[in-house]
Amino acid sequence: MYLENARALVQGVMVLAFAAIAVWVHFEIGIILVFVMGFLLVQSSFTDWCIPDPFLKRLGYKKKLE
C-alpha cells in the first residue's frame, strides 16, 4: 500500500467516525468535526500534504512516484 492509499484510508475512517459521533454522541460536535475534516481534505488536494503523512512515513509508506 502506498502513502496516498493509506492517507485515503485514514481520512475515510475519520469521516465515518465523526459522522458516528454526530449521530450517537453529540450532533453539533460531530458536525463541526466533519466540517474540519472537509476543510483538511480541500487543503490536502491543493498542497499534497496531510496531517497523518509524517506518521505514515514513519510506518514505512512511500509515495507512488518514489
Image (cartoon, rainbow, N blue to C red):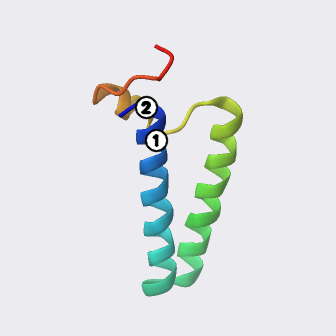
Q: Quadrant of residue 25?
A: bottom left
Residue in the picture at 62% in, 48% down? 40
* Residue 30 picture location, percent across and down: 53, 74
Image location (x, y in percent) of residue 37 = 58, 56
Residue at the extreme bottom: 24
Q: Residues within 10 Å of mark 1 (few under 14, many from 20)?
A: some
- Label 2 to label 1, Cα distance in Å? 6 Å
Badge 2 element: helix
Give the total number of marks visible in the rendering: 2
Based on the displayed image, in which of its 4 quarters is residue 46 positioned? top right
Circle 2 packing at 10 Å, graded few (<14), some (14-19), many (20+), is: some
Are the two marked residues, 2 and 1, in contact with CB atoms closer than 8 angstroms? yes
Q: Amino acid at mark 2?
A: Leu
- Please, which residue is most extreme toward the top here? 66
Name the kind of residue labelled 1 in the image.
Arg
Please report the residue visible at 29 percent of the width from the left and 25 percent of the height from the top.
60
Closer to the camera in the image, 19 or 12: 12
Q: Residue at x 57, y 31 (%)?
A: 49
52 shown above or below 29: above
The label shown at residue 16 is none
Horizontal and vertical percent position of residue 16: 46, 67
Q: Nearer the viewer, residue 60 or 52?
A: 60
Mark 1 residue element:
helix
**Residue ID for mark 2:** 3
Vertical position of residue 14 compared to residue 64: above or below: below
Residue drawn 40% across the image and 31% down it:
2
Of all residues shown, which one is farthest toward the left?
Answer: 59
User: Which quadrant of the rendered structure holds the N terminus?
Assistant: top left
The answer to whether 17 appears left or right of 42 in the picture is left
Residue bearing the label numbered 1: 7
